[in-house]
Amino acid sequence: MGYSFYEIYITSQRAFRALGFPFGADEDAGFIIAWLELNHFHGIKILHNLITSIDQQYDGTIKIDSLSEKIDFKNRTILMKGSGLIDYLQSIINQKEEISVTIKNCQDAILFLPLLYKISKKISYLELQFNNSNNDIHKYKIKNNEITFEYETNKDLLSINEIIIIMNKDKKNLKNFSAKKIITQKIIQNNLLQSIKPAKDLWEKVSEIASKTFVPESEESRDKGAGGGDAND
Amino acid sequence: MMLQKPTSNSSFTPMTLDRMGSRYPSRLSFSRSMLRTMIKDNWKIKRTKFDLDKKGYGTVIYEINIAKEIYSLVCFSAFLSDEDRTDRVIAEKWDTAYTLHIGKVNEAELKRLKKNIPLQEAGRNSPKELVLSRGNKSVRLFKKITETLAEGLQPEINDINDVGYLLRTTAVYGSGKFGLSDFIRTESSTIFDQPFRAEMLAVYLIREFSVDLVEHVAHHLNPKKAVKLKSNIKQHLGIGNSTGLGMAPFIIKHPKLIHKWMSQFYKVIQEIKSKELITANKLKQFVSLLKKAQEYLNEVLTSDVFQKNKNNQSKIDLDKMIKYCNNFTINKKNNNWETILEFSFKNLNFDAQEITQVQLIELYSAIADPLAEDMSSSDDMYLNVNETIFSLINFIERHYSWAINVDYTKKENLYLFWYISEEKLEPRLGERYNEEGAELEQPLGIGKMAHELYNFLIKHKETHNYTVAEFLLRHPQFRGIIRRIQTLSDYDLGEVNDNILAKKTLPINMLRFKLSFFGASRYDPKSDRWLRVSFFAGAPFYSDLNSQNVDNWGFATMNSY
């Protein structure tokens, strides 16, 4: 069955709320999942796989002593800590030309991509690097709401579950942006033309979690909650 | 009786609930701007399918040709027993169901739509559908007009005024609901780049359908004698709408959009005050428009005592304004509309103040109409990550006094909670101390959240030198409310300046606010949380619509035709 971006977003956001995410964090996490699902990065599957580990375990706090040290996510998902970190990096890049940070003990690195894409109008250049399961380096480069993808085989530059994020305000560094673009505004619009089709069983599970935010039906709420009256006049 | 304290312009706070509940439609309303665009851009509408049986059950399609694009309103009509007819969202069957589809409808698509559209929320739509709606007959008026026309007679316009419509929509969905096209896509790839424009077109065409339907049924009742409705009588018909609490969460969840609508409205007023001088002719036109509004208030019917009293007071107060204008001396020192508006703020109730403003706007189409074509705004919220907590506290103290000065330990200030019922996901309002479900409350109590944030910040002095980004690393639970407060520092008309959890809250005020921007008239509250209204009442039907009459139907009365 096909769904709209709005439906994927609102159902995910409600699911996060049911899983204990506070107001604001649920919206960010819902956006991440919906954006990934819209653009064929399997957001619903990622959310589905995380349900058990995040249920009522929300912890969005991050301890940062120095950006030159690795930031420890302590195996808590980017859905909890990612937004706060990106905001913090934004506050620092306002005073610097470039930042490069490494995050350790952090899985599902692709969850950073929607957050970086969202701020790409404000920051000239962004890059996300991480290893896949074969230890190949994946590089997503973002500029002006466009994303390119490259990968390098067996570079072994990063440890497992480590992620590098680079932010750069200097437009001079943007020359090598020639790889094939995997995300543009046009691609996103084209994706919106199609219904989004998450796997049925995964979607049903996420919807079931979302439904925990709904108040069970009762005669009293039906009568008092929303009005009524004679409709045959 | 609803008597509001006169307010001076200096203390003018347009986003309080009582003011929001006093608004009226204007030239900027979406029904008005949609019809203007229809004329300006030469939209062509034709009925391409009319497949109804003698009782009026079947399928009808209206095609809308706009430049090189085609859209189709597909209407399904079916038998509905009286016991199944309800205006509530929780209904499962309706007399009629509709969709506005992108492009012509082919047989395969018609089959898909026929299977899904009558099911409404239980069906599935595709990104090719922009709007999903349904409507029930006003049984009383539909039957009466059918029988009258079948006898070769015309109904009395008073009969039409008593009810106002033949069909009453009970939901008009768009923007990604139930698989429909997302607005970010609709806005960029169709001609419907303004909020609710596609919905307004659908509603206007449903009104056309309502007359086609009643005339068809009348004809088959008595083919030899039946006549069609006369233009001047049918023009008084609107399309009804029954609206509940769903509109209130929308206002809280889309504050930038609400700011945009309000700021465009006040931009028009400001431009008029700063650039336009009162002339004898303009003043005469203004008085005439005020009298028209008074006549409308004389005719509009409601069983709600609160609304009746408001209407009566408004009539009395409009009299004051008319007298003031009639005695107004125009000279070099006294020729600015500011003077007249100031009089209204000091002497009229809120409703009459609003009427004064919307009727003033009618005089200056060159100012208002371009702004009515710029009513959209993104919903994106953002943080000002480098602002210090000290600065944020100062901002909250200056702009959220309505929230931080409320005592939330008092039950009456925390009495209500907003929730979503599992039954068709209907938005509802519960009583915290009397009903189950408060733990599943929706985060719509902005005042309470701002109050909690403020108290936390005041207690934690060690945070005052942090930037917002640093603060949120340590206290991410405040992310949503800080983002909202910071975003709205640039959109000061986006926030409802009242505690909507308070026992005294009248949700209907928020409904009326939104409906006024849609262009709804004939407000008929049925409780404090739902009401009936009409759309396009008094507007010319498509066959009569032209550039001369497209904008003269505000506050239409029985004498307007």
Image (spheres, grey):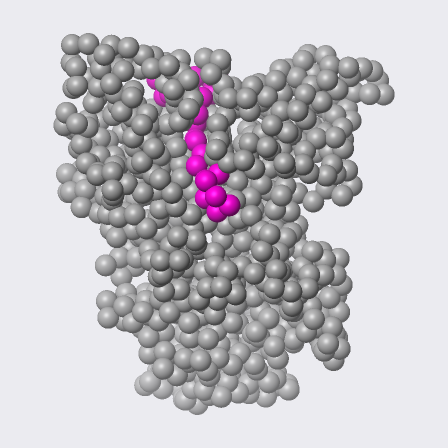
Evaluate whether residue A93 shows in this view: no
> Extreme right residue here?
B333
Taking the image as shown, residue A55 lies to the left or right of residue B380, namely: left
* Residue A188: quadrant of the picture: bottom left
At horizontal 55% and vertical 21% (from top left) the residue drawn is: B298
Residue B24's place in the image compared with A184, above or below, is above
Report the predominant secondary structure element of the magenta stretch: loop
- In the foreground, A54 or B353: B353
At horizontal 35% and vertical 42% (from top left) the residue drawn is: B87
At horizontal 48% and vertical 27% (from top left) the residue drawn is: B301
How many numbered marks, from 0 up? 0
Quadrant showing the N terminus of chain A: bottom left
Provide residue B493's location: percent of width, then percent of height. Answer: 64, 47
Provide residue B338's location: percent of width, then percent of height. Answer: 76, 28
At horizontal 73% and vertical 14% (from top left) the residue drawn is: B326
Quadrant showing the C terminus of chain A: top left
Provide residue B308's location: percent of width, then percent of height. Answer: 55, 31
Provide residue A160's location: percent of width, then percent of height. Answer: 41, 89
* Residue B129: quadrant of the picture: top left
Evaluate whether residue B337 shows in this view: yes
What is the span of residues highlighted in magenta in the rendered image? B525-551
Taking the image as shown, residue B121 lies to the left or right of residue B421, namely: left
Taking the image as shown, residue B74 lies to the left or right of residue B181, namely: left
- In the foreground, A48 or A149: A48
Residue B88's place in the image compared with B406, above or below, is above
Residue B452 magenta-highlighted: no
Residue B560's place in the image compared with A23, above or below, is above
